[in-house]
Image: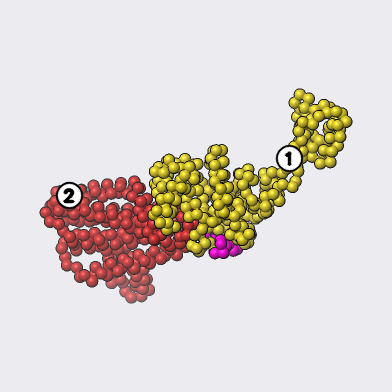
Chain colours: A yellow, B red
Amino acid sequence: MAAVLEIDNLYKAFKVGFIPKKREILKGVSMSVAAGEIFGYLGPNGAGKTTTLKCVLGLIFPDRGKIEIFGHPPLSARGREHLGYLPENPYFYDYLTAAEFLDFYAQLFGLRKRDKEEKIASLLRLVGLEKARDLQLRKFSRGMLQRVGLAQALINEPALLFLDEPLGGLDPLGRKELRDVIVRLKQEGKTIFLCSHILQDIEMICDRVAIIVGGRIISQGALQSLISEKVLFTEVTLSGIDAADLIDLGEPVSTLGDRILLKVVQEDNIENLMELVHERKGKIHSLVPRTETLEDIFVEMVRQG
Amino acid sequence: MKIKTIALNTFKEAIRDRILYLLFFFAAIALAFSRLLAVLTVGDRVKIIKDVGLASISVFGVLMAILIGTGLVYKEIDKKTIYTLLSKPIQRWQFLLGKFFGLVLTLFIMILAMGLIFLIIVLLHTGKLEGRLLLAILFIFLELVLITAVAILFSSFSTPILSSIFSLSFYLIGHLSWGLETLLHKTRSGAGRIAIRALSAVLPDLENFNFKTEIVYGLAVDPRFYLFSALYGLVYTLLILSLAVLVFNKRDFI
């Protein structure tokens, strides 16, 4: 698939403090986002996620490196024609009502009057804010701002959508709804670039991820290739066997009545355990292999990084 | 088109800002106060009303331009609203010009309203509608346009308080710089004279917009002088705006 966003060896340093001291935020970030995928961009706070985004959107100028959006440099208005962006902790003109706010952005894209009305109504419906249409944004809750922010990002039917922590500040129901919206947008053929540190969300919807730590991308690839292979350990619930006999095979975690929960780390031991249970006429109630989650990988990589 | 959209939104923002009405309220009080002052004065009362009235319009106009102007760009950056705006297909100069014209429109409406109140007060007192006063107000407006550009220039790289101080200094220096001409005549030629000449060339001369005395006292003014002042304002404003765009284009929005 063709790449819609190409970032090559991006460097950015800021001067901070009274006596300016150079602080490197990005140290050679490269990535490529293909058309039609949901791309997750992960990293701990301060790793450089938002800085990367700002470089891509032309809000700050990288010291070195190359960025191309649909083959255009980010500072060209052409490149931004098909972009949508929802910033982290969005703050908007609070003196406008939701409808006025969307109208303002629609005008910037030169939408015609009839199309504009329809578009605004359908977007407000999409994000569930029809009733708040004529309410000033200053009266909006955090979650409502997030929703109207998403509506704003979609006003021009963008082909590439940048979402910076889109699920922050939402309640569980709101998170689910927004996740569904994002998946629906992908089905419509849009490419979505998602910055987040809420790993479950990324794990649920992203096709590919890049992990940034300390200004460097330390891992990048399809989500399955990163996490699915490795089985960390297996949890076995069994009964009818003395706990003392199991010590060689695994680590008994807890007992409830005659049931024992055993954590088996080595895969060979599973076979031995089955044989033992068969021999002693015991019973296996459940056997759950625990694969690695994105969180496990993330924590491990951040520690190493 | 995009500039117009941003300008109208800026106008909406300024019009919904309480500080504007506060200033307008005090301006109206000052205008009414000129009538009271006239009663207390020995001499030509109409001249006092006109003098104080025009001065009030000028001072409150400048306060509006500086207090709102210095906040406009800064607030967008501080509240991060500029992130979403500049991620749309808008160039930075379009954003800056939009802000400028939005504030100019706001000031136009405010000056118009203050001017009308002023004309009515004069009308009540003299029984005559004096169109020539509008000319003085027009040049006050041209001065405000320049001050707005200055306020926007400063607010594109500095905080509102600092920008306000800078802009106010620009205004004061601009009204005192004619003193350099006098100084020039009294200085012997040499390095000092060259320095003063250079300074008077660089510093703005806002007295160019001041036709209050001439108009209040009914003195004749060469029309070429009006033209010169209008051109002066236009060129200076363009210069300042270009500078603001240059600064703004280089800026990182952290």
Q: Is residue B170 magenta?
A: no
In the picture, residue A175 is in which quadrant?
top right
Query: Could you tell me which secondary element the residue under label 1 belongs to?
Result: strand
Q: Which residues are magenta?
A: A58-72
Q: A143 above or below A28? A: above
The answer to whether residue A103 is left or right of residue B28 is right
Nearer the observer: mark 1 or 2; the answer is 1
Q: Residue furthest right?
A: A279
* Mark 2 residue type: Arg
Judge left or right: residue A172 versus residue A134: right
Q: Residue at x 81, y 35 (%)?
A: A250
- In the rendering, which numbered label is found on residue B186? none
Image quarter of the N terminus of chain B: bottom left
Residue type indicated by callout 1? Arg
Chain bearing mark 1: A
Visible residue check, residue B152? no
Residue A105 visible in image: yes
Neighbourhood count class around disc 1 (C-alpha, 10 Å): few under 14, some 14–19, many 20 upward: some
User: Which residue was labeled with disc 2?
Assistant: B35
- Where A301 falls versus B251 (above or below)? above
- Marks 1 and 2 belong to one chain: no
Q: Nearer the viewer, residue B5 or B150?
A: B5
Which residue is painted at 54% across and 64% down in the image?
A73
Q: Which residue is mark 1?
A: A290
